[in-house]
Image (cartoon, rainbow, N blue to C red):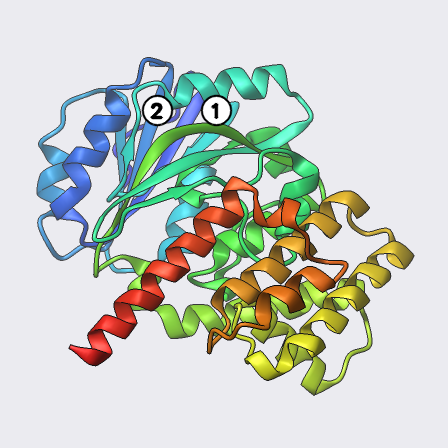
Amino acid sequence: MIRDDKIAAPRVSVILPVYNGAEYLAEAIHSVLGQTFSDFRLIVVDDGSTDRTPDVLTSFSDPRLHVIRFPENRGRVAALNTAIAESASEFIARMDADDICRPRRFARQVRFLDEHPEVGVCGTWTLGFGDAVSHYRPPRNPEDIRAHLFWSIALDHPSIMMRRSVLEQHSLAYDPCCRDVDDFDFFIRAAEVTQLANVPEFLLWTRAHPGEVSVVNRQEQMAVESQLLLRQLKTLMPKTTDDERRFHLQIARDDVDVCRLADAERWLLRLEEANRQMNRYDTVSFWRHLQWKWFQIHATVEPLVMRQPLNYLRSPLGGLGVMASPKCLSVFGLNLINRVRRWIKNWV
């Protein structure tokens, strides 16, 4: 049921799907309604919730809040596409029912999009809290984001703000066939028709808890993610063997055995050569992300042996400059801490 008629549209429509999210929903809504930028409409899609979600929603009287209720659960993709169709604003912002917006998030993103008309989708850096603490700093500029999308997602989905004109001009919508990784699929397709960017500020807090979608549906998510990664690979290397595709997925997930480090190096260099021939990605950005992948493989490979640092440094993909970057030091330090924790757990 739709509680409202379309009226004169504000500059921003905020779309928030929720399914049985009563525990954190009120806090999420308060963080949206408390924005310093007030010219928005918050569209909440209650996706057939069976908990107290409807009661939480009716407890708010702010006229900017509008609710759409599905009689039964239809999934996040249907909720998002319905909310987009119901909105009529220049910009469309995402929000999740368990996250928290910083007060100036919308103001900063609107200003960024006004100053960068070539950008169609704009995310932000995010802070993770709850069951896990994290600092997510995705790439800032469009070339790096597009290269990063070859391996993994490069924007935090709940943080994005999009131009309606781009969605309409290119018929961009969320694909129901890509359930649970619909954001990854959406960004890959969006990067083909517009520029993607991230505001380098922590403007959203994302909550980690056992009930979040990425935890509950992890196996299905990985299966669809594999299809997207191989789809990306095919655009760069149309002809690959089954073994090569399986190994590519292992590299994408930093799951390379120590005895296959040389194979991984050869594969990454093949990708670099293929990109130079195809000219699909910015060569500097793509090379930088290949170097980053080479570092990640060495930072996570098991077991840890003394020859790995030399193996890393001897490669054209390696180098002390890459290792000394704050991003690499952070990943290496985190993996070292996790190794020590596992060692203690095994011996206590």
313 or 236, which is in the foreground?
313
Task: State the residue position of label 1.
Answer: 89
Task: State the residue position of label 2.
Answer: 41
Q: Earlier in the sequence, mark 1 or mark 2?
A: 2
Coordinates of residue 290 in the picture (x, y in percent):
69, 57
Coordinates of residue 230 in the picture (x, y in percent):
66, 70
Where 80 falls versus 122 (above or below)? below
Quick one: label 2, few (<14), some, or many (20+) residues within 10 Å? many
Quick one: label 1, few (<14), some, or many (20+) residues within 10 Å? many
Q: Amino acid at mark 1?
A: Ser
Based on the displayed image, in which of its 4 quarters is residue 334 positioned? bottom left
Indicate left or right for 194 with 9 as reference: right
Mark 1 touches mark 2? (CB < 8 Å): yes
In 3D space, how far apart are the residues under numbered discs 1 and 2 (Cα atoms)? 9 Å
Indicate left or right for 220 with 178 as reference: left
Q: Does residue 120 appear in this view? A: yes
98 or 18, which is in the foreground?
98
- Classify the position of the N terminus by image quarter: top left
Coordinates of residue 319 in the picture (x, y in percent):
68, 52
Please tell me which residue is depicted at 21% across the width and 61% down the height of the picture: 210
